[in-house]
Image: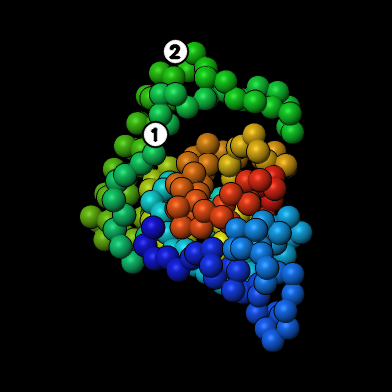
Amino acid sequence: MVNLSANDVMVAKAARVSTIGKRSAADDLPTEGLINFLMRDRHGSPFEHNHFTFLVEAPIFVAREHMRHRAGWSYNEESGRYKELEGVFYKPAPERNLVQVGKAGAYRFEPGNEAQRHVVERDFYSAYAWAFQHYTGMLNRGIAREVARMVLPVGIFTSYYATCNARSLMHFLSLRTISEDAQCPSFPQREIEMVAEAMEREFRESMPYTHAAFVKHGRVAP
């Protein structure tokens, strides 16, 4: 987390502004109850008067998945045109499932066997080493950064700022996490789910009533 202006009280204030000067049932609800009502009945705009700015460090393939979320999100990313990229690459953790079983729309992932894990370990290392060696070699021979970067794989790390409001964050979480509480099941790739889990921890801490209502009502963004 880099910057934060988000709390439950502002959600309630934004909701109550529609009846300023005229008493309504919403005025009798405490903040927690009002937020629960808003979430249940899908009144979404009061959840937009806040912001979260995250600094994300992740492989390029994760960043590209993240940036598919456009409504309510803003991004600024480091540029391989303007700086020499560092040789930091992603390798799946030993517990990461490797094998997809089943057909499209009805598949699951399984751990794989020792031989498959060995292949991943060996081939990730050799591919990354080859690519980065040729990337730095081209730079040393005067090739422009924007050209040399073309040989780099999507497993190289990038960094970017991602800014959103609570409403857009809840939509992101509904699609990029796996939860038994979800009304609509989602099947994200594990690596972007890890990013989403870190963001959800910040969301839960800064807006506990909003997060609780989000979970209670099936993890569907209002």
Residue 127 coordinates in the image, percent (x, y): 39, 35
Which of the pair 206/52 is nearer the observer? 206
Residue at the (74%, 29%) spot, across then down: 106
Q: Mark 2 falls on what kind of element? A: helix
Residue denoted by label 2 = 114
* Residue located beneath label 1 in the image: 91
Please state which of residues 39 and 80 is positioned toward the viewer in this rendering.
Answer: 39
- For marks 2 and 1, give the CA distance: 16 Å
Q: Residues within 10 Å of mark 1 (few under 14, many from 20)?
A: some
Give the amino acid type for the residue marked by disc 2 in the picture. Glu
In the figure, is residue 13 to the left or right of 204? right
Name the quadrant of the N terminus: bottom left
Classify mark 2: residues with Cα within 10 Å, few (<14), some (14-19) or many (20+): few
One can see residue 77 in this view: no
- Seen as rendered, the residue at the extreme left is 140
Q: Give residue 58's position: percent from left, percent from top.
A: 41, 48
Q: Secondary structure at mark 1?
A: loop
40 with respect to 6 (left or right): right
Q: In which quadrant of the rendered view does residue 10 lie?
A: bottom right
Q: Residue at x 67, y 41 (%)?
A: 182
Percent x, y of residue 184 = 73, 42
Position of residue 17 relative to residue 111, above or below, is below
Q: Which residue does the image show at 39% across and 39% down from the upper left?
A: 90
Q: How many marks?
A: 2
What is the quadrant of the C terminus in the image?
bottom right
Between 208 and 61, the one lying in front of the other is 208
**Residue 117 position within the rendered picture, expressed as x and y whole percent measured from the top left:** 44, 19
